[in-house]
Image: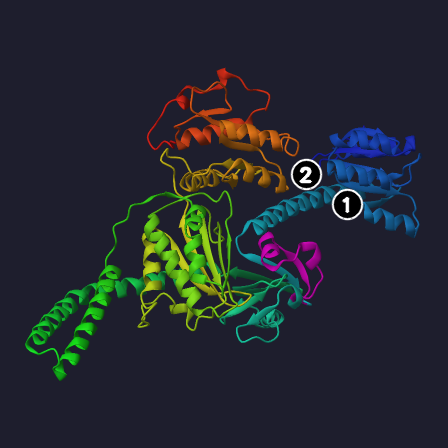
Amino acid sequence: MTAPVQTSKSHRVLIVEDEGLIAADIARRLEMLGHRVTGIASTAQEASALAAEADVVLLDIHLDGPRDGIDAAMEIRARYQVPVIFLTAHADRTTLDRAKLAGPYGYLVKPLGPAALQAALEMAVYKHALSRQLEEQEAWLRTTLASVAEAVVVADAGGHVLLLNRTAETLTGWTQAEAKGRALDSVLPLLAAQGGSSVAGDLATLAMLRDDVVTDGRAVHLAARGGNTVEIEASVAPVKSCSGSLGVVVTLRDVGPRRWQENQLRQAQRMEAAGRLAASVVNDYSHLLGIIRNQGARLLAQFGEYSPARRAIEEIEQAATAADQITRRLASFGTRQAMHAEILSLNAVLRGLAKPIESVAGQRIAVTVHKTTGIGRIRADQEHLEQAIMNLVLHACAITPPGGALRLETGSSRNGHGRVSLTISYSGEEQDIDRLFDPSGEPETGLALAVAHAIVMEQEGHISASRAKQGGTQVEMLFPVAMEESGGAAAQPPSKTPTILLVDPREGVRMHLQNILEAGGYRLLEALSPEEAIALGELHEGSLDLLVADDEDAAVVTAALRANHPEMQELRVVQGPETALSELRRPFTERALVERIGALLTRAPERDAPDDVPDHLSNGAAAAISS
């Protein structure tokens, strides 16, 4: 008996051949070469069932049955990733073209010789291992590319887009499927600051020409799909192989947030310098003004009522008084003011300023106030914050032409997590927007905007001004979301924002409850009386989830609105002991109110029993809302 030929490695081989004698001969040859035959199949179905145990499959293209060897090879490759070597005695061009689609690792013509069989097995296993290694590397690179913070766009040597990562899709507005095959300049319209045509194609050509990374040192803007313009930094790196240039990789970095932070730092440095200067000169000027006023008073006492010099001395005294007021303002600007910080809702602050803002704007400016619910609360001094807002509003109204618009809007910050924003947009155009908050010599607003800036910074916030896209000016104030006294983060809005209808005739109580409920992520509708609540409920297009009202008012409102809002629950404010979860005894604390509302909105409406009332909710507490 002939001894098996020793090979570098033994492989498990599945034979798929419908001719029994040929299959047995191939099995004998494999065993002589030192390989192990895991099975012999004669149909495509059997091959698919046995392929999982093999390292290599020797598969005849022409098999009996409804499915041939090519169909079996495609299924084996998809399910098991096992390399396939085709066997055939002859094949036409159509069959060969189909066989290529199955991705075979070899092609042997029967009858098989030992040397050809061994070489085919070794090459198939080697190529398969190399292919798996390349697939793993590609998976690593693809995931890495998708996770980087910079936008990455890959283009071929002809300037056509091949790939965009997720950041690039977000930045450009193009998806991978939409951008693939398009010209680089159409997907990345990179415009120089002075305008003109896109420079993306030029940078790609230059990178391939230099065979090195090219970075555009100019101020470049990306005209993103949808109309947005983003300031970016762009670098282009060529991709080369031994055969020549394959294309380029374009890396884009959004420098808008960095520019914003740099502007904030420069503005803070200028304000700090101005504050120190103001503090250093206030004492000297106050002393000099005191001398002028005292000596002026003495001169007035020496001249008669009708002396020609009296009028000049009176004007000197008036000028000294005005200068003293300016000095006092400089003193307040140059020193940090004592703050009494508390947890506030920006929406509630805006509501309290609604009438003063409308009064300042008058009939010549259209005022719009938009309050976003569920944005969280901030820790700030309410009096100082109101002063900062009104300083900005007064300035905006002063430079906004008649017929212009003023808009105040609260929301969440676009420049980072955990911040609440207040944006003031107005139609007026600022001459030097980069130095808007610098102290100036204008009599009315010379220090008003600088004071507003100082107040916002003292509240650990940020303030910036920019030109609005639709024209005019936009001032944005950012404040960190306050941590509640319990130590947890401010309440986050639920996935579905519940709507609460509040009935209370007291303006102060409604404002306070608005502060609490909107910070908890609820949408609030307010009414002074049951009649107004019924009208609001009938006009409201969405659902009403909860009614909060005194016991008698709740009965009237519920009876009128039950048909339109059958799922609406009640929270009745009562004077006596609580008998159900839907009752809340006055006086109650903020925490008790929020917990009771949350309990009502998360339970089934029919589950209403006196035993559900938490013990601590029936007790009075500090900071209670009383009648």
Q: Quadrant of residue 499?
A: top right
Number of dots carrying numbers: 2
- From the top left corner, tell me how far across and down residue 612 is, in percent: 49, 18
Q: Which residue is mark 1?
A: 105
Label 2 neighbour load within 10 Å: few <14, some 14-19, many 20+: few
The residues colored magenta run: 159-184
Q: Which quadrant holds the C terminus?
A: top left
Q: Which residue is mark 2?
A: 8
User: Is residue 84 within the magenta segment?
Assistant: no
The residue at the far bottom in this view is: 308
Amino acid under disc 1: Tyr
Q: Quadrant of residue 327?
A: bottom left
Q: Residue at x 47, y 68 (%)?
A: 400
Residue 223 or 450: which is nearer the viewer?
450
The residue at the far front in this view is: 306
Q: Secondary structure at mark 1?
A: loop
- Residue 198 visible to an observer of this rendering: yes
Q: Is residue 220 left or right of residue 128?
A: left
